[in-house]
Amino acid sequence: MKVNILWDFDGTLVDSYRVFVRTFKRVVEEHIHEDEVMKQLKISFTHAVKYFGLSQQQIDQILEMERSLHPSEYQPFPRVEEVLQRANCNCIVTHNSKQEVLRILEYYGWLHYFSEIIGWEDGFPKKPNPEAYIHMQKKQAIHFVVGDRALDIIPATKLGITTCAFQNEAIPEADYYIDSYDQLLHIMKEKSLQI
C-alpha cells in the first residue's frame, strides 16, 4: 500500500527550533538556557510566551525577526526528502503562516511534494483540535501523521491514524518514536507500506 502522510512543519520537516530558540533568546534578553526555551517551545509558542511572560511587543519582535530570516536558516532534517519522494501523498497542517511555509518549501524545491498545506490563515481551530486533520482525511486517506509535539499527535490519535513522534519521546500518545528519518523509512518498510 502506498502511504499518505500528514506532516507538521516546524521541528518536523525543517529544523526551525534552532532558529526559534536563538530569536527568542535575543528578544527576551535574559539569561535563559537554550534547553529551557526549547522545552517550552516544544509544548507550543503560546505556552512559551506565557511561561516567560513576554509582552505583545516582544512577541511582535520575535515574529518580525523570524519573517526576515532567509529560508536557508531553516534546514531540512536529513533524509526527510527521501520520505517525501516515496510517499504517495504528503500534506501539512501547521500553526505557522502558510505563506512562510510556501516560501521555505519553494526555496528547497519541495512544493511539488505536497498536495495541500493548511496554515493559520486557513481558519481552522488550532491543534490539537482535529478539524484540519478531518478536512485532510476527507480529501485523501491519511495513513501516518508525523509531528514533534503532543498537539500534532493528539488529533491523529482521536481519529485512529497511526502516529509518529519525531525527536520527542515525551508524547505518550504516539505509536512510534523516531530520532531520524532513517527510522521512519525502516518502520514503513517493516509495516509493508510501499514508500
Image (tube, rainbow, N blue to C red):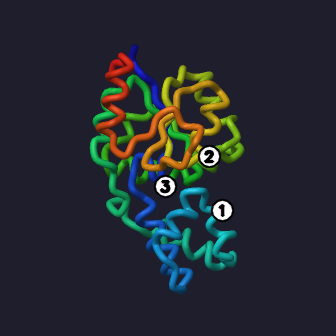
Question: Which residue is at 39% across, 23% downward?
Answer: 88
Residue furthest top in the image: 1
Image marks 1 and 3: residues in contact by CB distance under 8 Å: no
Separation of residues labelled 3 and 2 (CA atoms): 20 Å
Answer with the quarter of the image where residue 59 lies. Answer: bottom right
The label nearer to you, 1 versus 3, is: 1
Can residue 133 be seen here? The reply is: yes
Closer mark to the observer between disc 1 and disc 2: 2
Q: Residues within 10 Å of mark 3 (few under 14, many from 20)?
A: some
Q: Going by the image, does 75 lie left or right of 6?
A: left
Residue toward you, 50 or 88: 50
* Distance between the alpha carbons at the discs numbered 1 and 3: 18 Å
Observer-side mark, 3 or 2, equals 2
Element type at marker 3? helix
- Which corner quadrant holds the C terminus? top left
Rendering quarter of residue 138: top right
- Secondary element under disc 1, as helix, strand or loop, is helix
Q: What residue did someone put label 1 on?
A: 46
Q: Is residue 84 visible?
A: no
Q: Quadrant of residue 161?
A: top right
Tell me which numbered mark, 1 or 2, is placed earlier along the sequence: 1
Reading the image, the residue beneath label 2 is 151
* Residue type (three-letter) at the residue carrying disc 3: Glu
Q: Nearer the viewer, residue 67 or 150?
A: 150
| Left or right: residue 129 compared with residue 22 | right
- Residue at (50% x, 43% y) in the render: 147
Dot label at residue 100: 3
